[in-house]
Image (spheres, rainbow, N blue to C red):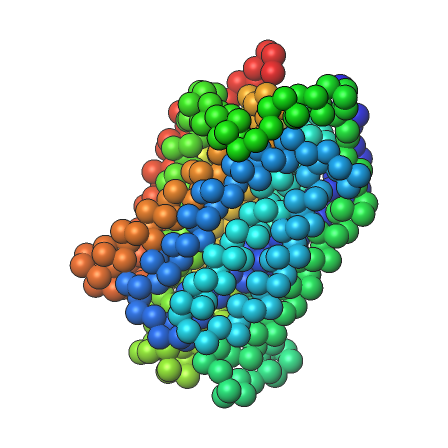
Amino acid sequence: MKKPLLNFWQIWNMSFGFLGIQFGWGLQMANMSAIYNYLGAKPDEVPFLWLAAPLTGLLVQPIIGYLSDRTWTGLGRRKPYFLTGAILSSLALIAMPNSSSLWMAAGLLWVLDASINISMEPFRAFVADMLPTEQQTRGYTMQSVFIGLGAVIASALPWMMTNWFHVLNDGTSAIPLSVKLSFYIGAVAFFGAVLYTIVTTKEYPPEDIKAFEAEKQKNKGFEHGFKEITHAIANMPSVMKQLAAVQFFTWLGLFLMWFYFGTATAKSVFGATSPQDPVFSTGIEWGGICFAFYSLVTFVFSFLLPYIAENLGRTLTHFLCLLCGAAGLLAVGIISNQYGLLLSMAGVGIAWASILSMPYSILVRHLPPNKTGIYVGIFNFFIVIPEILAALFFGWIMGNLLNNNELHAVMTGGAMMLIAAFIALTVKDKDPAVL
């Protein structure tokens, strides 16, 4: 089927749900390590406490991709998964800041991460479903726009609660009231934004619905699903394998930033000596502002990204953007001023805009149209595997090689992103003649 070109507002509507999804990711990434610290975690324990989330993603993403490829209901193909994930994620966001122990918080992170993935993975396939090839880069960069906007607000919410609305910790919980209220707002935003996309966007049905249903009945069951997923893994397109290496080092760098940037800011720039130090929460909130700033840069830069990619090519564009991100994280080691951190985060924001769009824009052109969901789910392995490795092994590195210095961990993330940038130059980004 020849897909029609969509106008700006149609692409806007189909991407708007990512605004809500990013509320979930933004609050999680900016605050979970701090929540663990508030509940008594040591720096070398933090990576392990993140472990359940990526392990779940490793299982959930290909399964949701496989199922959504084979789904057609009155609500559509991908939209039932958008809705299910939004409901579960919103409930987890409400429960998270009420955690009374480390293991409760880690368990809720597991639920939250799994639920966000139920919504997010089909959103990636949604672009390939709805847009012709020539508009797919714009589709993914529109998702980046909403990811940037959502993360600006989500990352800054605790700071806004404290400084704009004068919300003070009531002393009844180790987790500040400003963080609790931010998570409650995030729950409402997540559900509302996803619901907007569901209501305003109509999916294209299978070209031959009878053949689609017959094929689904013929190949139903767990055994067939397992075989199809393993077959897809064994037969990944060559460009997907090349991108996998880029993704691996990129996301390893990002996770080290998310694990440690907030506490590095609190200790290295604000001088906090422990989570009980009054300036510790101030530093954590400023870390959230830095995340909000890089997300603002992502929001603005995402409008320019399609034009840059059209002129320089997607591969060179991605290389240059990753280079900016690496420079930003490495520069943290020589910055002692809180406002100087904003400059370093500008580089991260440029990289983040490209990370969210260029790899997917390159990838989907090389995938069979009827298996986009399953391959995008498998592609996300190379996001969660680095997080698993970081969770399993970086705690030892922190305790034995980096002396539990969060600043050095963030700089290590910059080195990982630098490696990813140069690997990106090896990706053969040529549109296939036949999909």
Q: Residue 155's x, y, as percent?
A: 55, 63
The residue located at (62%, 57%) in the rendering is 88
213 left or right of 425 in image: right
Tell me where residue 296 sits by quadrant: bottom right
- Count of numbered badges drawn on the protein: 0
Residue 343, relative to residue 381: is it above or below? Answer: below
* Identity of the residue furthest to the left in this view: 400
275 left or right of 309 in image: left
Q: Nearer the viewer, residue 373 or 14?
A: 373
Q: Residue 44's x, y, as percent?
A: 28, 63
The residue located at (45%, 68%) in the rendering is 104
127 left or right of 249 in image: right
Tell me, yes or no, if residue 403 can be seen here: yes
Location of the N terminus by quadrant is top right
The residue located at (37%, 44%) in the rendering is 386
Q: Residue 35's x, y, as percent?
A: 44, 70
The residue located at (33%, 78%) in the rendering is 274
Q: Nearer the viewer, residue 385 or 340?
A: 385
* Identity of the residue furthest to the top in this view: 433
Tell me where residue 69 sits by quadrant: top right
Residue 326, relative to residue 433: is it above or below? Answer: below
Residue 353, relative to residue 205: is it above or below? Answer: below
Q: Residue 136's x, y, as percent?
A: 66, 30
Location of the C terminus by quadrant is top right
Tell me, yes or no, if residue 160 can be seen here: no
